[in-house]
Image (cartoon, rainbow, N blue to C red):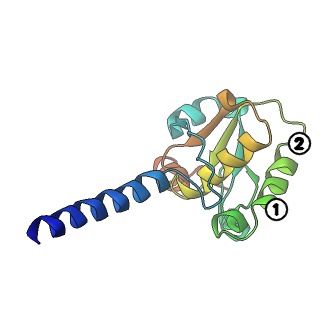
Amino acid sequence: MKNTRKVVSIVLVLVLSLGLFTACGKKDNGKADVEMKKISAEDVKADMDKYLLLDLRKAADFDEKHIPGAVSADLDVVVSGNDEAKGKEVIKKAIEGNDKPIVLVCYSGARYAQAGTNALSELGAKMDDVFTLEGGMKAWTEAYPDDLE
């Protein structure tokens, strides 16, 4: 009886572990997240004209303050899980005609940037030229509090 409980317990742990393992790194639709490449605020600041800064935060937050020259591409609809297709439309419109490397700006360099990275990949962007601002707008604001619009 003791051995049977141990075996059942071990099997349950393995099944649950396998479920968690396969779910990690995947979006709700089952696709794996595209790996993000980070770039520091200092590196962006040193060569700002080289990049298209794509601010993925909510439009109201962009309007309140943003990095000079940044373009708003609100991806809240994607992050909230409501409309991935709409998010791709927003990104596509924002990068139309762009030939510069892209720096994605979000709140902290995580969820919104990941949504933007995934969308750009699905749109066929050259992923070697897509970067995420490390630490997001929070890091930029701390490093350059006087360099905001």
**From where the camera sits, is residue 79 visible?**
yes
**Quarter of image, res 102:** top right
- Quadrant where the N terminus sits is bottom left
Distance of label 2 from label 1 (alpha carbons)? 15 Å
Count of marks placed on residues: 2
Of residues 125 and 24, the one nearer the viewer is 24
* Label 2 residue SS: loop
Residue 121 spot, x, y in % from top left: 72, 40
Residue 124 spot, x, y in % from top left: 79, 36
Residue 139 spot, x, y in % from top left: 48, 50
Res 7 label: none
Q: Earlier in the sequence, mark 2 or mark 1?
A: 1
* Label 1 residue SS: helix
Q: Of the residues tagged 2 and 1, which is closer to the observer?
A: 1
Q: Amino acid at mark 1?
A: Lys
**50 lies above or below 27:** above
- Quadrant where the C terminus sits is bottom right
Residue tagged 1: 86
Q: Residues within 10 Å of mark 1 (few under 14, many from 20)?
A: few
**Quarter of image, res 53:** top right
**From where the camera sits, is residue 69 visible?**
no
Residue 2 spot, x, y in % from top left: 9, 69
Of residues 16 and 92, the one nearer the viewer is 16
The structure residue drawn at horizontal position 17% and vertical position 70%, both measured from the top left corner, is: 5
Q: Residues within 10 Å of mark 2 (few under 14, many from 20)?
A: few
Q: Amino acid at mark 2?
A: Glu
Of residues 18 and 55, the one nearer the viewer is 18
Residue tagged 2: 96
The structure residue drawn at horizontal position 23% and vertical position 60%, both measured from the top left corner, is: 10
